[in-house]
Amino acid sequence: MHSPRSWQDLAVFGGRPLFNEPLHVNKPNLASRDRLFERIDGMLARRWFSDGQLVREFEQHISRLTGVRHCVATCNGTLALEIAIRALNLTGEVIVPSFTFAATVQALRWLNITPVFCDVDPETHTIDPGHVERLMAPRTSGIIAVHLWGQPCDIDALTAIAKRHRLALVFDSAHALGSSYRGRPIGGFGTAEVFSFHATKFVNTAEGGAITTDDDALAARLRAARDFGFDADDRIVGVGTNGKMSEICAAMGLTYLESFDELIAANQATYAQYKADLADIKGISLLPLDTVEKCNYQYIVTVVDESITRISRDELLQVLQAENIFAKRYFYPGCHRMVPTAPGGEDASERLSVTEKLARTVLVLPGGASIDNREVQGVCETLRFAVKYGTQIRNAFANCVGYKNVPGEGPGRHF
Ligand code: T4K
């Protein structure tokens, strides 16, 4: 790793990149290979590859961790959302934040349900309960709230609204395994909660998901729906799909769960180092996390204030990418820009003003347990340097002087 001497040395202007290998957001961390291979050996010996002993063990572990009676593991988080939405008979319109990963909204659209876009809180980036209340309409059948970046929503307010309007309340908890709300683990709130165990999550099954709930009847419907509609007696009891988790995925998940505390501690150390290293960069603020509640610290979320940095989030992203630092502008440009005709998409600048602003300013940096101190330092030094020479870099971009355009994520990739 080397540092540029002048802004013209930045890789975006043709200099040597700071990192030889790409530094990704949430590169998968690693748990014990030996334990994983032991489990895979057992699986091979049993000749049982899908929805078997390891999946049941994984479900029990998640149930214990989240303090709920039922965990229904699935092949990914998006399918888990779809199964939950269908099992809850959601129809018509569902209120959902626009500032979320595409999956939350696409799951609704896949089922021909209209997403009604809600704004988020500027401090926590989670759904604004006051706006939820204002969006209630005769066709509203439910609310899907997202514990974004692992931070719990205002669960009390949302629960009260859902109760008052007799609506299903589903939490998309894809980011929030290991987080807590008022001392209770995320997983046991609302009608159901949905997790993702994608490779980029700190507990991962390569691809995987789960639904947690304390509702026995709902759990039975979810289990049947994930298995072509078959119940435990092999009778078709409803519409179903194939959403089962494979044994090899459960083997991975169980192995990561064994390192749960260490992985969170490593994530927290990464977050702490970013906090220290970013502190003196004016205009780039790290999203503060609740220090009383538990959190998994998986996402390193910053907000760029261009009026201070004099260089925009997108320009910073170009500088970083050229250095092989693949930061991300989650969740640009906001899901409402994907479905402009859905209610809430029109007049977006007024109705979804916080979402619009966050979509323009949020920059997620490489984090997690597999990034080391030196790499964090390199990311922060690059940002510090780019902000220091923000005006020059911006002018050079405008004049296209020696500017090497970086083929990165095209606009719209993240909705
Ligand atoms: N709800 C919410 C709120 C979610 O954020 C998500 C998923 C879901 C629901 C749905 O859950 P799943 O159906 O995915 O289980 C990523 C993830 O693919 C996605 O799971 C996640 N949210 C989202 C926030 O991020 P992308 O579009 O950023 O691209 P991806 O997965 O190709 O790469 C992400 C980064 O990780 C890159 O920087 C490359 C790196 N990477 C990726 C993989 C797969 C690795 O280093 N190794 C890998 O194996 O979506």
Image: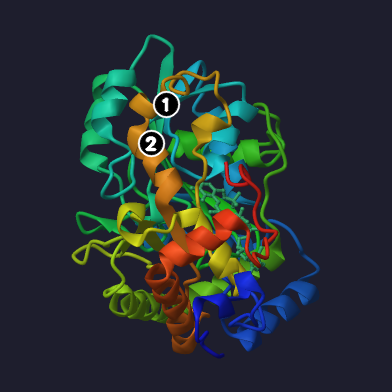
Q: Is mark 2 within 8 Å of ligand 1?
A: no
- Amino acid residing under circle 2: Thr
Earlier-in-chain disc, 2 versus 1: 2
> In the rendering, at what x and y percent does residue 360 appear?
44, 46
Image region (quadrant) for ligand 1: bottom right
Mark 1: few/some/many CA within 10 Å (<14, 14-19, 20+): some
The circle drawn on residue 229 is none
Residue located beneath label 2 in the image: 191
The circle drawn on residue 348 is 1
Q: Tell me, yes or no, if residue 319 can be seen here.
A: yes
Q: Is mark 1 within 8 Å of ligand 1?
A: no
Q: Tell me, yes or no, if residue 326 can be seen here.
A: no
Residue toward you, 190 or 56: 190
> In this picture, is 304 found above or below 133?
below
Q: Quadrant of residue 57?
A: bottom right
Q: Residue at x 66, y 64 (%)?
A: 249
Image quarter of the C terminus: top right
Q: Is residue 288 left or right of residue 310?
A: left
Q: Are marks 2 and 1 in contact (CB under 8 Å)?
A: no
Residue toward you, 34 or 43: 34
Residue toward you, 288 or 360: 360
Residue toward you, 309 or 22: 309
Q: Residue at x 61, y 61 (%)?
A: 55
Q: Residue at x 50, y 40 (%)?
A: 219
Q: CA distance from mark 2 to mark 1?
A: 29 Å
Element under disc 2: loop
Q: Nearer the viewer, mark 2 or mark 1?
A: 1
> In the rendering, at what x and y percent does residue 71 appear?
49, 51
Q: Is residue 206 left or right of residue 292?
A: right
Q: Is residue 10 left or right of residue 40?
A: left
